[in-house]
Amino acid sequence: MNNKTKSILYGTLASSILLGVYFTVLTLVSGWSFTQEQFVDYWYFVVSGVTGLATFAAQYQVKLFWVGIFFNIAGIVYMINRIIKFKKDYE
């Protein structure tokens, strides 16, 4: 499978997942009939938003990966500091 085919496949998969999350969250919050009404009324915003976000994420996947690692490390350091402070306060 060449890179172009992989990109199309990943973009389609990411868009489908985002659309699924949209439908799931909106259905859980407001019900299925409301979700259907909103999609019928605003499908062009939903579809363009989903495909645009998937395209953005695919283009910047490596950069987003490094940002995610940075924030994970920062969170670990923060939690370690909180644990050390907690231990000092209760010893």
Image (cartoon, rainbow, N blue to C red):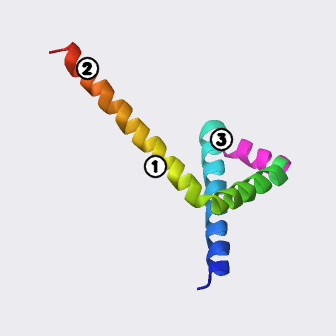
Q: Is residue 28 left or right of residue 36?
A: left
From the image, give the main secondary structure of the stretch colored magenta.
helix
Magenta region, residue range: 31-41
Answer with mark 2 or mark 1, whichever residue precedes in sequence: 1
The amino acid beneath tag 3 is: Gly
| Mark 1 neighbour density, 10 Å: few (under 14) some (14–19) many (20 or more) | few
Tell me the CA gap for discs 3 and 1. Answer: 36 Å
Instruction: Identify the residue at horizontal 34%, vertical 31% (top origin).
Output: 79
Q: Is residue 20 left or right of residue 74?
A: right
Q: Are marks 3 and 1 in contact (CB under 8 Å)?
A: no
The vertical placement of 73 against 17, above or below, is: above
Q: Is residue 76 left or right of residue 20?
A: left
Q: Is residue 59 magenta?
A: no
Instruction: Identify the residue at horizontal 59%, vertical 59% (top origin).
Output: 61
Q: Give the residue number, with chain letter if any, for mark 3.
A: 31
The vertical placement of 23 against 90, above or below, is: below
The vertical placement of 21 against 26, above or below, is: below
| Mark 3 neighbour density, 10 Å: few (under 14) some (14–19) many (20 or more) | few
Q: Are marks 2 and 1 in contact (CB under 8 Å)?
A: no
* Residue 53 x/y as whole percent: 70, 54
